[in-house]
Image (cartoon, rainbow, N blue to C red):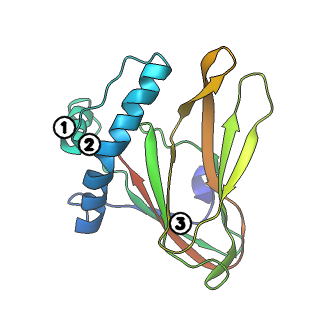
Amino acid sequence: MARHGFGQGEYKYFAYPLPDVVSRLREALYPPLATIANRWNERMDVGVRYPERHGDYLAQCHAAGQARPTPLLLKYEAGDYNCLHQDLYGEMVFPLQVAVLLSQPEEEFTGGEFVLTEQRPRMQSRPQVVPLQKGDAVVFAVHNRPVQGSRGDYRVNMRHGVSRLRSGRRYAMGVIFHDAG
C-alpha cells in the first residue's frame, strides 16, 4: 500500500478463476445489491441500470475492456492503516461493495477500525466507525449514495479506510463487483 500512497499494509487481488467461496459470494450478494443500486441511481437521476445477474454485469465490464477481477485480501500489522479512498477501477463501477473481517478484534488485533466518511455538499465531512467482529461483513457505497434532504435527494461522496492498527495482525476480504481495466 505504501508504494502507491494508500497507507501501510498489504493487499493481493485474486485472479480468475476466483476461489469458489469468493465467486459464490459475488454471485449471491449481487442480485439484492443490484436492486438497491438501481433504486439509488433512480433517486440520483443516473441513467445506468444494472442487470439482475452478476454474470451479465461482468460480461458488460469485459466488453468495456475491464476484465481483471477486483476481489482482494488485505493484511495489516501494528502501525498499518488504509487511507480513505474509493475503489474506482474504470468507467464501469458497481456502486456497492462488501468488506468481510477475517480476524477477531481485541484478540488478534487492536485498533484497525473500518471507517466511512460522508463528504456532504457545502458541509464538513462526517466519519463513521463500523464495529465489526470476525466473520462480520459491511456493505458500503463505493463512490456516491443518495441522501434524503429537505428539498429531495442529494448525493454524498463516500470514502472508506481502516484506522491504524495498534497491535497484532488484521485480515479482511474485499468483495468488489466490477472488474478492472
Q: Nearer the viewer, residue 126 or 160?
A: 126
Q: Position of residue 93 (x, y in %)?
A: 40, 34
Labels 2 and 1: the sequence-earlier one:
1
21 above or below 157?
below
Give me the residue at 75% from left, 41% from top.
126
106 above or below 100?
below
| Disc 3, SS | strand
Can the viewer see residue 91 in this picture?
no
Can the viewer see residue 43 in this picture?
yes
Q: Position of residue 49 (x, y in %)?
A: 32, 25
- Residue at the far bottom in the pictured view: 107
Q: Nearer the viewer, residue 72 or 28?
A: 28
Give me the residue at 61% from left, 83% from top.
108
Q: Is residue 108 left or right of residue 137?
A: right
The kind of residue on which mark 2 rests is Ala
Q: Tell me the distance, in whole angstroms, between the alpha carbons under discs 3 and 1.
A: 31 Å
| Residue that label 2 marks | 67
Give me the residue at 27% from left, 54% from top.
28
- Residue at the far front in the pictured view: 150
**Which label was assigned to residue 169?**
none
**Which label was assigned to residue 10?**
3
| Residue that label 1 marks | 56
Q: Tell me the distance, in whole angstroms, between the alpha carbons under discs 3 and 2.
A: 22 Å
The kind of residue on which mark 1 rests is Asp
* Quadrant hosting residue 65: top left
Q: Nearer the viewer, mark 2 or mark 1?
A: 1
Labels 3 and 2: the sequence-earlier one:
3
| Disc 1, SS | helix
